[in-house]
Image: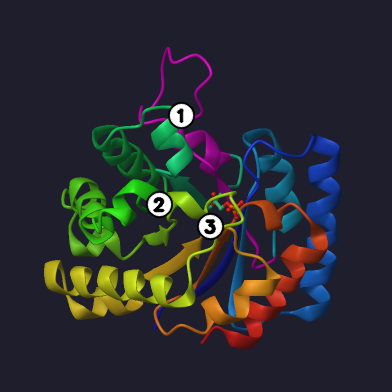
Amino acid sequence: MARKIIAGNWKMNHTFKEGTKLIEALHRFYNSENPQHVEVVIAPPFIHIPMGATLSANSRVTIAGQNCSEHEAGAYTGEVSAAMLASAGAEAVIIGHSERRALFNESNDQLKAKLKQSWANGLMPIFCVGEQLEQRQANKHFDTVKAQIDGVLAHFDADTLENLIIAYEPVWAIGTGEVATAEQAQEMHSFIRKHLAEKYHAVLADEISLLYGGSLKPANAKELFSQPDVDGGLIGGASLNYDSFTELIKIGEEVLR
Ligand code: PGA
């Protein structure tokens, strides 16, 4: 069975002081609620990672990067390597978020190299896929997601992919308040699972966690998390706030199975 995961992607939000306060508060919540079914992942900006990892030591909260360099090391000003993330205490990393693809022109070749770096350094990648609005309107959403998966993951074998989480984030639903319906999410998640079963094997397809992302909030989480192929969420806006993120963890704990 796939792991159930509530992951917060802070993007470029929260100063160091605000981030420290939020992670401290999330730990107090986590220790008192002690969720048994869901795992919590927090992906703060790079500079918060050592603080987040120190606060999360000896807890089941995982700290993740939002990105890493495709290079191992060297003259790449402004970049952060997977080895650095791991050495600072991160255990996971988001790869191929639609904002990275669109705003920083990340290509399949770069994403492949980033995945390689993540695995080589013991990080669990959260690989993001999702179609643009025009692709959905043209009924090309399945083909788009399939091409994103095959264009990057085809280069790795099934054993490697056991250490992977996939997040389906329809681009039109990210930060827009426009959420995919539970049916649309379920339909795509089930498509991804079937595709992985055909390409690799059924055990991998069953065990890989498939997260939904895009305007997830407490008001719509119950319905989305109740879908059989939705194993959790990758949450942007609602992860920045203590009340909404802890509410999402509570809903996940109650509904995700
Ligand atoms: P959102 O972002 O929840 O603010 O829509 C989700 C994401 O980009 O991961």
Q: Position of residue 95 (x, y in %)?
A: 42, 45
Q: Compute the Cα span from label 3 to label 2.
A: 11 Å
Residue that numbered label 3 is attached to: 214
Mark 2 beta carbon near ligand 1 (under 8 Å): yes
**On screen, residue 239 above or below 201:** above
Q: Is 159 included in the stretch rendered in magenta?
A: no
Q: Compute the Cα span from label 1 to label 2.
A: 15 Å
**Residue 103, numbered label:** 1
Q: Amino acid at mark 1?
A: Leu
User: In terms of secondary structure, where does tag 1 sit?
Assistant: helix
Q: Position of residue 194 (x, y in %)?
A: 22, 75
Q: Compute the Cα span from label 1 to label 3.
A: 17 Å
User: In terms of secondary structure, where does tag 3 sit?
Assistant: loop
**On screen, residue 69 above or below 174:** above
Tell me: 10 left or right of 167. Answer: right
Q: Identify the main secondary structure in magenta.
A: loop
Task: Tell me the crowding category of disc 2: few under 14, some 14 to 19, or many 20 or more residues within 10 angstroms, Cα based.
Answer: many
Q: Earlier in the sequence, mark 1 or mark 2?
A: 1
Q: Earlier in the sequence, mark 3 or mark 2?
A: 2
Residue that numbered label 2 is attached to: 128
Mark 3 beta carbon near ligand 1 (under 8 Å): yes
Q: Amino acid at mark 3?
A: Gly
Foreground of the two, 185 or 124: 185
